[in-house]
Amino acid sequence: MVAPTSSTLYRLKDFVFQQKCIPWSVSNRYDRWLERDLHFRSRRLYGMIKFGRIKEIVQPLTKGPNHHFFGYYEKSPWNKSEDKILAHEALFNDRPPTQDDRLIVGFVSADNSRDFNPIAETFAWNWQQGAMLQWHPCDADNKVLYNNRVDDQFVGICRNINDGTETVYERPIYAISPCGDQGFSLNFSRLYDKRPGYGYAGIADSFAKDNHSEKDGVFSIDMGTGKSRLIISLHQLANLNPLPAMKDTPHWVNHIQISPNGKRLAFFHIWRTKEDGWSVRLYSAKLDGSQLKCVLDTGSISHYDWQDDSTILVWAKHPQRGAYFLYCNVEDGGIRILGEKILTEDGHCSFSPDRKWVLNDTYPDSHDLRTLMLVRRSDGKRIDLQRFYSPKAKWWGEIRCDLHPRWNRSGNQVCVDSVHSGQRQMYLVELQGIV
């Protein structure tokens, strides 16, 4: 489906083809010419036809020969002053990392110098989320958090980029509260086995033979002392309104995210349903694990973001209908659809800092192109920003390079990871004059 805010030329073309004024074969040839030929030969002309925009809003943030990426979409790589952007640097781009593969964590300057400044190295990482690199909320100009493997243990590390001092936490950090006092963790070894592309290689899962251990699940980390404790167990989740399909099958958790004001956390409870399949429940709880609530239980649930402390936007199967982006109220259980006719596929959604816009992307289409877009919440207006080439024949599965679009703190820029140049690099998208 064409976005309603595409250029006038593109809307005219869509109207003509939809009305069948032109044969399908002609329409198909036009699309192939536009998306496969013009897209690569003349970016300016393509942008004018596709988006009604001559100005190029996408600029490279990093450069080769090494590969650079940030990872997931729910963390902003910009520091508080917005003059540094966190990044990972890798020497290869064509296979999953092994336990012996080193990744460098660092940053680039926001002035488009494109020079990578290394901070440290890690052996706990993946292509989807890197080493969970993020700024520490208590000092978002000087302290960075990332995970590593030290002495046969996955740990979280806080490093001061000015003096090099470090604090080591006994568990790897997945998410951290907005005030920086609590971190949250899960079993990355189990993820490595159960959900390739999201776990870390090098350490065996201690609970591999247990389908839902009482000692594994969601952990809270005291960021002052570094100590951790289990707040929600897999055993607890497996026994909450159990389904027949949950019996005698492995369970795990993933995708912990904290609400904007730090009142609640959300996460996925996942269990294996087939050899390569799984089913998901979306849960919410207070930060101590109490007031645990199942927000959505339709089996098929994907990417999400908190709008506020009571509302989650998530791509999922509707209880009575198909799959949509759903607003889910964690307090009263209410559900409503966002962009039913313009958001027709899964993507990595996130709210702008002022909560007026939803940033989203797509997986590669039939032309191997991913679309980056904005949706205005007030009226559902969709603005397509750019299309990025991402050939599935080369980058798919756990080595795929999703755009994973992320906002800066001011809400006037985003950055993405992309392989359209043949390398995995980061790109800045300027939103001045658009939002």
Image (cartoon, helix red, strand yellow):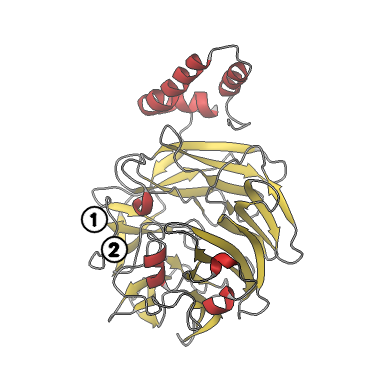
Quadrant occupied by the C terminus: top right
Q: At which x and y percent is residue 81?
A: 49, 61
Instruction: Classify residue 152 as left or right of residue 269.
Output: left
Q: At which x and y percent is residue 307?
A: 65, 58
Label 2: state its secondary structure: strand
**Alpha carbons under labels 1 and 2: distance apart:** 8 Å
Q: Earlier in the sequence, mark 1 or mark 2?
A: 1
Instruction: Please state which of residues 161 and 199 is positioned toward the viewer in this rendering.
Output: 199
Label 1: state its secondary structure: loop
Instruction: Please state which of residues 361 and 119 is positioned toward the viewer in this rendering.
Output: 361
Q: How many marks?
A: 2
Q: Are marks 1 and 2 in contact (CB under 8 Å)?
A: no
Residue that label 2 marks: 103
Q: Is residue 217 above or below residue 401?
A: below
Q: Could you classify mark 1 by the number of other residues whose Cα lies within 10 Å: few (under 14), some (14-19), or many (20 or more)?
A: some
Q: Is residue 350 above or below residue 23?
A: below
Asked if residue 268 can be seen in this view, the reply is no
Q: Is residue 388 above or below residue 269?
A: above
Q: At which x and y percent is residue 40?
A: 36, 28
Looking at the picture, which amino acid does disc 2 mark?
A: Leu
Asked if residue 211 can be seen in this view, the reply is yes
What residue do we see at 55% from left, 41% from top? Answer: 373
Looking at the picture, which amino acid does disc 1 mark?
A: Leu
Q: At which x and y percent is residue 390?
A: 38, 40
Instruction: Classify residue 313 as left or right of residue 200.
Output: right
Residue that label 1 marks: 91
What residue do we see at 62% from left, 43% from top? Answer: 375
Quadrant occupied by the N terminus: top right
Which numbered circle lies on residue 305? none
